[in-house]
Image: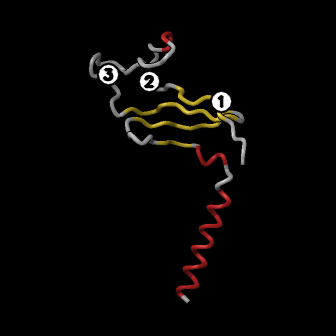
Amino acid sequence: MKRFLFSLLAFASISIYAQDITNPNLILGEWIPKEGKSHVKIEKIGNKYFGKVIWLKEPLDKETGKPPLDKKNPDESMRNQPIMGLRIMKDFVYIGE
């Protein structure tokens, strides 16, 4: 009986997960990149997805004592924008399989 209940529970869990895997909104929320130096919030605006930096492990630049800037941006005109609040994902859409 225990084995049957365990099998049933495992099957139900897998079935629920399989249904959710096609839900594009599963990406919504707060994510921590592998390095752990920031948190990124993924949000949906209209039918598109966006991501922005909402937390930094080091909120102040060690050299300047001010919030860090996007110094490595290939567009020189954008290098003075703060990383905190920076939109790093824009206009992503869910296409499906």
- Residue located beneath label 3 in the image: 61
Q: Position of residue 35 (x, y in %)?
A: 38, 39
Q: Which amino acid, by three-letter code, is at mark 1?
A: Asp
| 3D distance between C-alphas at marks 2 and 3 | 11 Å
Position of residue 44 in the picture relative to residue 82 (left or right): right
- Residue located beneath label 2 in the image: 83
Q: Position of residue 60 (x, y in %)?
A: 32, 24
SS at badge 2: loop
| 3D distance between C-alphas at marks 1 and 2 | 19 Å
Q: Say few, some or many: other residues with alpha carbon within 10 Å of mark 3 (under 14 / 14 to 19 / 20 or more).
A: few
**Which residue is pictured at 41% across the width and 35% down the height?**
38
SS at badge 3: loop
SS at badge 1: strand
Q: Say few, some or many: other residues with alpha carbon within 10 Å of mark 1 (under 14 / 14 to 19 / 20 or more).
A: few
Position of residue 26 in the picture relative to residue 55 (left or right): right
Q: Which amino acid, by three-letter code, is at mark 2?
A: Ile
Q: Position of residue 53 (x, y in %)?
A: 48, 31
- Residue located beneath label 1 in the image: 91
Q: Position of residue 7 (x, y in %)?
A: 58, 79
| 3D distance between C-alphas at marks 1 and 3 | 29 Å
2 or 3: tag closer to the N-terminus: 3
Mark 1–mark 3 CB contact (< 8 Å): no
